[in-house]
Image (cartoon, rainbow, N blue to C red):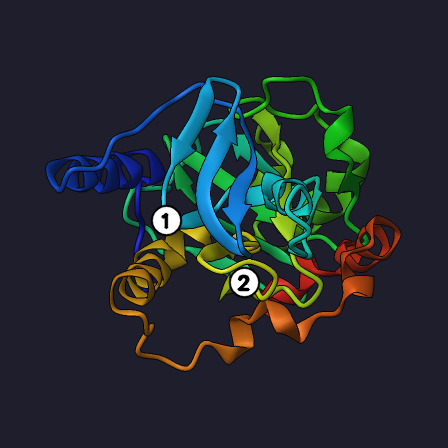
């Protein structure tokens, strides 16, 4: 059956456990690039100085590609506009009701504060060039785009007719990065020893975070992930697949592959 996780609470739990095991979190620090010597990581260069370390993990989400390029590490992924609408309260909606999915309509949804959250994994998604976003953008959103979302809202109304007479509280438009095959990147960069990448989870980051994070931790500590991770290898792509013009064309179709 379906499970439901509060991403904020989950992240807080991860941080709490990490701190109890000696980790430190530095917020508001701009990472410039990894520092290396003889083709191996020796630190990280930031806007507040250099941090010495033996291992770097690039898990920078939609910024992972740009950060990788600073060290000539190819991480093919690109952000697109990604939507969900929050409705006003609806009769007969309750907190533990099942999640719904319509693969043909490319929509999904669940209860949210007495109403419904209705989202889409759209075909012909709109690419987002990160250089055009305001800074800082970590907790920001893009403007509503009803022209792009309305065909999927119509699909939702087809499945749930009562939505036709229900108000919309807000349309959330938050960029989400996708890889050229909608699979994640989990690998050590071929170009740089001890530079690990966990990015491009293509809208399944919360779902996969515990398993993939655990495998990566084992790989770093024990030198072996203990699993065949070839499907997530960076080597499944060539340099041509990290070109911006290619990625902008390719990722337009990747959100709709979520239901594939």
Residue 54, which numbered label? 1
Mark 2 Cα-neighbour bin, 10 Å: few <14, some 14–19, many ≥20: many
Sequence order check: which comes first, mark 1 or mark 2? 1
Left or right position of 72 against 229: right
Answer with the quarter of the image where residue 132 lies. Answer: top right
Q: Given this view, does label 1 or label 2 mark the residue nearer the observer?
A: 1
Residue under the point 75% across and 56% down: 251
Left or right position of 216 against 239: left
The quadrant of the rendering that contains the C terminus is bottom right
Question: Visible in this render: residue 73?
Answer: yes
Residue topped by disc 2: 184
Residue 14 or residue 191, whichever sits in front: 191
Give the farthest residue toward the bottom.
228
User: From the viewer's perspective, is residue 244 above or below residue 142?
Assistant: below
Mark 1 Cα-neighbour bin, 10 Å: few <14, some 14–19, many ≥20: some
The quadrant of the rendering that contains the N terminus is bottom left
The spot of residue 130 in percent (x, y) is 72, 32
The spot of residue 30 in percent (x, y) is 52, 24
Q: Tag 1, which secondary structure?
A: loop
Residue under the point 69% across and 57% down: 76
Answer with the quarter of the image where residue 178 lies. Answer: bottom right
User: From the viewer's perspective, is residue 180 above or below residue 91?
Assistant: below
Residue 50 or residue 127, whichever sits in front: 50
């Amino acid at each position: 059956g379906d499970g439901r996780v509060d991403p904020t609470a989950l992240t807080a739990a991860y941080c709490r456990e990490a701190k109890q095991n000696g980790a430190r979190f530095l917020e508001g620090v701009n990472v410039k690039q990894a520092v290396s010597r003889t083709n191996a990581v020796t630190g990280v260069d930031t806007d507040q100085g250099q941090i010495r370390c033996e291992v770097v993990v690039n898990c920078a989400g939609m910024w992972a590609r740009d950060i990788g390029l600073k060290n000539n590490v190819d991480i093919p992924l690109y952000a697109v506009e990604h939507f969900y609408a929050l409705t006003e309260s609806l009769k007969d909606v309750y907190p533990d009701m099942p999640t719904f999915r319509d693969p043909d309509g490319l929509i999904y949804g669940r209860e949210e504060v007495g109403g419904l959250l209705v989202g889409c994994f759209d075909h012909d998604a709109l690419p987002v060039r990160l250089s055009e976003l305001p800074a800082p953008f970590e907790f920001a959103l893009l403007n509503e785009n009803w022209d792009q979302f309305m065909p999927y809202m119509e699909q939702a109304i087809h499945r749930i007719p009562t939505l036709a007479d229900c108000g919309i509280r807000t349309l959330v438009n938050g960029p989400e990065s996708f890889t050229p095959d909608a699979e994640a990147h989990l690998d050590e960069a071929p170009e740089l020893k001890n530079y690990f990448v966990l990015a491009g989870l293509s809208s399944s980051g919360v779902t996969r975070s515990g398993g993939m994070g655990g495998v990566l931790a084992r790989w770093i500590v024990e030198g072996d992930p203990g699993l065949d991770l070839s499907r997530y290898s960076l080597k499944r792509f060539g340099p041509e697949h990290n070109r911006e013009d290619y990625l902008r064309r390719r990722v337009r179709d990747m959100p709709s592959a979520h239901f594939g």
